[in-house]
Every structure is written in structure tokens, then in C-alpha cells.
Image (tube, helix red, strand yellow):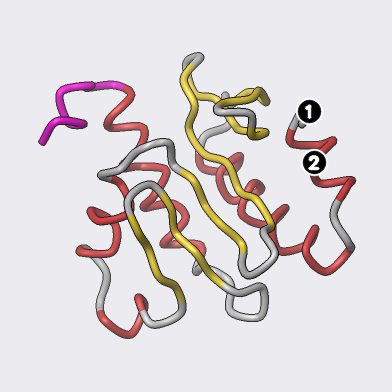
């Protein structure tokens, strides 16, 4: 896979709108991100480190913050009503295109991952 922009072009229009929105929220929150790849996935990079990838799979849209800790941290900080629209596991957050992640949740994922990039000891916490 190539860059984020190339990946977005490969999606059908409905999925592209949802996936692109997540990337747009990230870019607005962190204007100095760059496009790149990590683990073979198109990703946005922060200070040369993988920040986030968003991919359409057969069954859902996955958000990958390149951290096993971030999904748990973000989910724990949300009220139950906000967690209802997605599920998470180590390293991924999954949601359906017709029930996208709230922008606040996306920003929380990004903030938690940036904290890890800036302080790698958090990854062991």
C-alpha cells in the first residue's frame, strides 16, 4: 500500500468519506503530521513515528494507533454511551461506517498516542 492519499483513492466513495474524515480530524488536531507507512499500512506519522492508520476491512473500519495501550486508555476515559458505537481490542478500535467514531474520540486516540511518542515509558505503563 502507498500513502494515505493513495489508499483513500482506492476506497469506494462511502467508505472513503468515513475513513477520510478520521484522517482529517487527525490532521486538524496535529497539523505537522506526514504521510508514510507502518506495518505495511498507510499511516500518518508524528515526529517520524507511526501515529495512526485507518483501514476498511471486510467487516468494519479499523483505527490502528500503533499501540496496545491506547485503545484501552481511550475507552476507559469515555462514558458508556460514547463507547457503545465501537469495540476495541489490543491495538485496534473497530466501528461500522454508519456509526462513525465521534471526533472527540479520535482526538483522544491521537492525544494518547502522541503522549506515548513523546514519553515512550508510557507504553510500559
Could you tell me what secondary structure mostly forms the magenta stretch?
A: helix
Q: Nearer the viewer, residue 41 or 116?
A: 41
Query: Most extreme residue toward the front, as rendered?
Result: 58
The residue sitting at 29% across, 21% down in the picture is 118
Q: Which mark is residue 73?
A: none
Query: Which badge, 1 or 2, comes first in the chain's sequence?
Result: 1
Q: Nearer the viewer, residue 16 or 32?
A: 16
Q: Nearer the viewer, residue 23 or 92?
A: 92
Q: Quadrant of the C terminus?
A: top left
Residue 76, above or below 119: below
Q: Could you give the CA–CA distance between mark 1 and mark 2, rounded to whole angstroms? A: 6 Å
The residue pinned by badge 2 equals 7
Residue 78, above or below 52: below
Q: Which mark is residue 2?
A: 1
Q: Position of residue 18 (x, y in %)?
A: 71, 63
Q: In the picture provided, is 69 more to the left or to the right than 97?
A: left
Please say if the residues under marks 1 and 2 sit with CB atoms less than 8 Å apart. yes
What's the magenta region? 118-125
Q: Nearer the viewer, residue 90 or 79?
A: 90
Q: Position of residue 69 (x, y in %)?
A: 25, 44
The residue sitting at 53% across, 70% down in the picture is 95
Amino acid at each position: 500500500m502507498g500513502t494515505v492519499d493513495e489508499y483513500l483513492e482506492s476506497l469506494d466513495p462511502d467508505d472513503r468519506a468515513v475513513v477520510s474524515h478520521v484522517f482529517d480530524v487527525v490532521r486538524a488536531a496535529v497539523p505537522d503530521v506526514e504521510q508514510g507507512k507502518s506495518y505495511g499500512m498507510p499511516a500518518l506519522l508524528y515526529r517520524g513515528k507511526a501515529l495512526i492508520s485507518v483501514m476498511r476491512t471486510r467487516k468494519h473500519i479499523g483505527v490502528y494507533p500503533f499501540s496496545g495501550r491506547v485503545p484501552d486508555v481511550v475507552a476507559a476515559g469515555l462514558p458508556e454511551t460514547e463507547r457503545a458505537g465501537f469495540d476495541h481490542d489490543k491495538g485496534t478500535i473497530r466501528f461500522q461506517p454508519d456509526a462513525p467514531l465521534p471526533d472527540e474520540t479520535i482526538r483522544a486516540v491521537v492525544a494518547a498516542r502522541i503522549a506515548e511518542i513523546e514519553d515512550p515509558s508510557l507504553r510500559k505503563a
